[in-house]
Amino acid sequence: MFMKTSDIELNTGERAIENAPRLTLRNGRSCIPQHYLQYTHSLASVEAIMSDVSFSDRYPIFVSKDAGTIILQIGIVGFDNYRAAVKQSGPKIVFGRKWRVEPNLPTSEIIQTAFLAIKKAREHEIRELFSLKLGGKKTTPFNNHHDLPLMARNADILETPTYPDISLEKSLRLIKFDGGVFELTDMEKLRNGLTALTLNFTPKLKGHHEEFSNAPIVLLLKSTAPNALYHALMTEMLALSNAYVDEHFRYRGFARFSRNNDVTAIAQLSADLRQNPEELLDNKACNFIKDFAAERYDTDITRVPQLTSSHYSKKLHDQLSAMKLSNFDMLLKAQNKS
């Protein structure tokens, strides 16, 4: 939903600061840059924003309220990662972590919150789908559900590899991704001591995981030990997943982080939008600059965490105080409100 401010479109939940400068872009259209807007987003305005976001039906974006706070959550539609699909009655939906959306968050940042939430939901899923066969058992060493406090207390048992001296080919045969397999198609020792590997991934089900199977996967390894291979492969799979989201996540049909957007053109637009308001306004400039500074400060103060009287809060206070931060008074002001 959009509102007209004369000839300028604003989203619901947006309002221009009084006397905000209007710019004419290189295509002749007028705008008020986002940093000259005030935001009072609601459940309805965030829902309206998300209705213009598209990615995949398998990752629906939910907007809700939790204890009065607006929340974004990503749903993930699919089969249980830890059971064979043939043994399940059908796909189900699970839900990712909750992402808080403040009412004064700029519209662009709300869109990018959904963008990041999708990336992290996919990362969680990818880590669970990467399996390693160990002693006849299927394990998922990269998943996010390991007991981290227990691991920290017993770090010594995590330093010795179970498979110290096996070949790359055998290392690859021990792993699968969602039942699909990796094949080594090329290996080359480089002059700088690195080893370049080229892998092909064949998914278990045709048409699945196109981001990994449509092109060879290339890895650069400092070592050909299994540990180096597995870490490099997971890193590359996450990078390929993120690149896939970059190209397919869209707002009103526009893929903000696509490689098709020219970096210098984005830089030029940013430069155009960041012109000095004193050069754009006449006698209204002083009042606007004062209002703009007040708005920025009022917004920033809402984002400062409130410290308590706990030992941990005192530790943070002392740590930040020692840094002699120029805006440390903002932290103290927020603390005094608590």
Image (cartoon, rainbow, N blue to C red):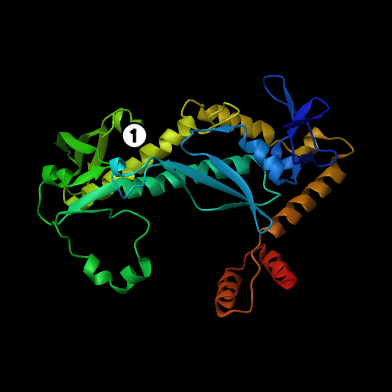
Residue 189: percent from left, percent from top:
15, 39
Identified at 55% across, 76% down, the residue is: 312
User: Going by the image, does 186 lie left or right of 85?
Assistant: left
Residue 72: percent from left, percent from top:
58, 47
Which secondary structure, mark 1? loop
Q: Quadrant of the C terminus?
A: bottom right
Give the camera-side residue of 122 and 323. 122
Image vertical order of residue 50 relative to residue 130, above or below: above
Query: How many C-alpha atoms fall within 10 Å of the one at disc 1: few (<14), some, or many (≥20)?
Result: some
Quadrant of the rendered structure where residue 17 is? top right
Give the camera-side residue of 99 and 27. 99
Identified at 72% across, 46% down, the residue is: 42
Image vertical order of residue 227 relative to residue 91, above or below: below
| Residue situated furthest top in the rendering | 27
Identified at 30% across, 48% down, the residue is: 83
**Residue at the disc numbered 1:** 209
